[in-house]
């Protein structure tokens, strides 16, 4: 039995906006990621995490980047990035070469095959995300994005 001062922490039954919203965001992200994982796996033999690694290259102004830079940009651990990079190298989507200045570091480059697979996967992702979020009315989108940006800015300033 719950005491009078005890707050409900169950995601489906909490009346607390902050918790309810956070749980909803988490569930939304999880379900979208799961859906995209299925689509990418079926059509491109690529996981969503591997796709994100490729996104890290497309968002980098340099041709060659380090695993640590990708991990930092995508908020992933270096161990996670390392695992996915190994698979992407085996699939010939990335090439890895030893850093001349530091023999313990490697630089990564997106191969031509990697660029092609990324571009094709990105088209699939765009199509799926458009379908998923089509129920959000155009007039509501700017407000949602403004609120998200405000929350993100607050969190990023606390880093």
Image (cartoon, helix red, strand yellow):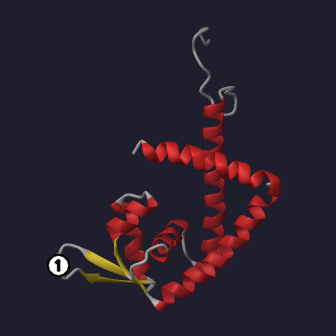
Q: Position of residue 35 (x, y in %)?
A: 66, 62
The residue lying at 65 percent from left, 34 percent from top is 20
Q: Is residue 27 visible?
A: no
* Vertical arrangement, residue 30 with respect to residue 15, above or below: below
The residue lying at 39 percent from left, 83 percent from top is 63
Q: Which residue is mark 1?
A: 101
Q: Position of residue 79 (x, y in %)?
A: 34, 61
Q: Is residue 131 left or right of residue 125?
A: right
Q: Is residue 45 left or right of residue 109?
A: right
Along the line of sight, which residue is nearer the eye, 125 or 34? 125
Q: In the rendered image, which quarter contains the N terminus?
A: top right
Q: Is residue 61 left or right of residue 20?
A: left
Q: Position of residue 46 (x, y in %)?
A: 55, 75
Along the line of sight, which residue is nearer the eye, 61 or 66? 61
Circle 1 — which element? loop
Q: Position of residue 148 (x, y in %)?
A: 62, 48
């Amino acid at each position: 039995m719950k005491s009078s001062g005890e707050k409900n922490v169950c995601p489906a039954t909490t009346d607390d906006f902050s918790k309810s919203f956070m749980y909803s965001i988490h569930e939304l992200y999880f379900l979208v990621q799961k859906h995209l994982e299925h689509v990418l796996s079926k059509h491109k033999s690529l996981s969503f995490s591997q796709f994100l690694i490729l996104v890290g290259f497309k968002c980098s102004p340099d041709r060659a980047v380090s695993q640590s830079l990708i991990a930092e940009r995508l908020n992933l651990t270096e161990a996670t990035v390392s695992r996915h990079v190994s698979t992407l190298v085996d699939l010939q989507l990335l090439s890895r070469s030893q850093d001349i200045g530091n023999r313990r570091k490697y630089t990564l480059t997106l191969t031509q095959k990697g660029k092609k697979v990324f571009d094709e996967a990105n088209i699939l992702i765009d199509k799926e995300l458009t379908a998923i979020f089509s129920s959000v009315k155009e007039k509501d989108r700017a407000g949602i994005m403004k609120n998200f940006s405000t929350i993100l800015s607050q969190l990023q300033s606390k880093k």
